[in-house]
């Protein structure tokens, strides 16, 4: 899921709406090639916003938006991408 939201059709609309989904939390793992299992990763959590969703996985983010419409809740929805 390396396809970033900023390259998607209607990207500017999706990015502009990102502040409306503060319960979507994004975790981006730093890419690191390894032939063995990694138990610790480098990365950080961020609240979904217009400044960070553009570089996040389009498939992951748009799927989460759909899930959030079907299951409204006040609990955060965490997304992880590399």
Image (tube, rainbow, N blue to C red):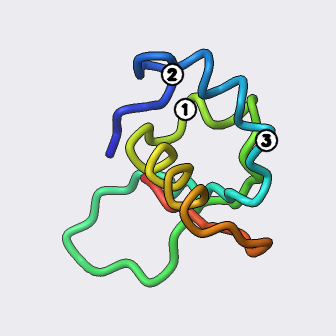
Q: Is residue 3 left or right of residue 40?
A: left
Residue drawn where x is 60% and y is 27% of the image:
14
Q: Secondary structure at mark 2?
A: helix
Give the CA separation, mark 3 to mark 1: 17 Å
Residue drawn where x is 34% and y is 39% of the image:
2
Tell me whether the residue at label 1 lies in contact with that at label 2, contact meaning CB atoms closer than 8 angstroms.
yes
Which circle marks residue 6 in the picture? 2
Residue 56, compared with residue 39, is above or below; it is above
N-terminal of the pair, mark 1 or mark 2, is 2
Tell me whether the residue at label 3 lies in contact with that at label 1, contact meaning CB atoms closer than 8 angstroms.
no
Which circle marks residue 70 in the picture? none
Residue that badge 1 annotates: 55
Depth check: 16 or 66 in front? 66
Task: For label 1, count other residues whose C-alpha is less than 10 Å away and answer few (under 14), some (14-19) or many (20+).
Answer: some
Task: For label 2, count other residues whose C-alpha is less than 10 Å away and answer few (under 14), some (14-19) or many (20+).
Answer: some
- Between disc 3 and disc 1, the foreground one is 3
Residue that badge 3 annotates: 20
- Between disc 2 and disc 3, the foreground one is 3
On the image, the x and y values in percent for residue 25 come to 68, 59
Residue 8, compared with residue 65, is above or below; it is above
- Between disc 1 and disc 2, the foreground one is 2
């Amino acid at each position: 899921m390396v396809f970033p939201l900023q390259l998607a059709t209607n990207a500017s609309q999706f990015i502009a709406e990102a502040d409306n989904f503060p319960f979507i939390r994004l975790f981006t793992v730093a890419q690191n090639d390894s032939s063995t299992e990694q138990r610790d990763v480098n990365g950080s959590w961020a609240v979904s916003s217009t400044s960070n969703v553009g570089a996040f996985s389009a498939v992951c983010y748009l799927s989460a938006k759909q899930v959030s419409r079907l299951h409204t809740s006040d609990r955060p929805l965490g997304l992880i991408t590399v």
